[in-house]
Amino acid sequence: MPDSDFPQKIQVLVVDSDPDSRDLLAALFNGYEARTIMAASASECLEKIQESPPDLLVCELALPDEDGYSLMGKVKAFEAAQGIRIPAITLTVYASDEDRSLALAAGFSRHLSKPLDIDEFLEAVTYALAQP
């Protein structure tokens, strides 16, 4: 049963080259009546954002065509050009303290390491969406 504090009916863009990871996150978000859009690469992510900016971006840093740090720079440029905000968190195999620092500096609200801890992830989503 969905948590009543969790935002309902949001649009989430999940970016991960691993189909199992994308499917897991889609199933989780669907349980909260979120619309999940999936991308397997940075270039596909940028196309999806231009078509319909999401309410939340969940991104793996290890992507096949470019890393998530670089992708986040492009997302930030899109935000500035459009005058919008796209909250973003990373759920990634890049788990070092340096990776965390780089992710936060790139503009991600939170850096979470795989494997997924559902409670930590849901708290991070709620936090990211609540930021101004």
Image: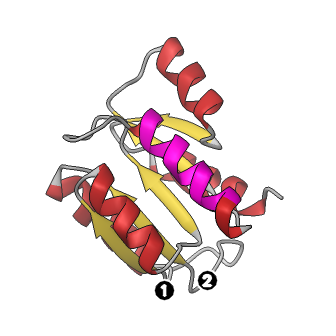
Q: Residue at x 29, y 55 (%)?
A: 43
Q: Which is nearer the N-term, disc 2 or disc 1?
A: 2
**Where is the C terminus found, in terms of image quarters?**
bottom right
Cα separation, mark 2 vs mark 1, equals 6 Å
Residue 130 sits in which quadrant?
A: bottom right
Q: Secondary structure at mark 2?
A: loop
Work out whether residue 1 or residue 73 is closer to the camera in this orientation and state it. Answer: 73
Residue sitting at the far front: 81
Horizontal relation, residue 63 to residue 52: left or right:
left
Main SS class of the magenta portion in the image: helix
Q: Residue at x 54, y 30 (%)?
A: 103
Mark linked to residue 33: 1
Work out whether residue 32 or residue 88 is closer to the camera in this orientation and state it. Answer: 88
Mark 2: amino acid: Gln
Asked if labels 1 and 2 touch by Cβ distance under 8 angstroms, the answer is: yes
Mark linked to residue 8: 2
Residue 36 in percent (x, y) is at 39, 76
Task: Give the residues in magenta.
Answer: 69-80
Please, which colouring scheme is shown? secondary structure
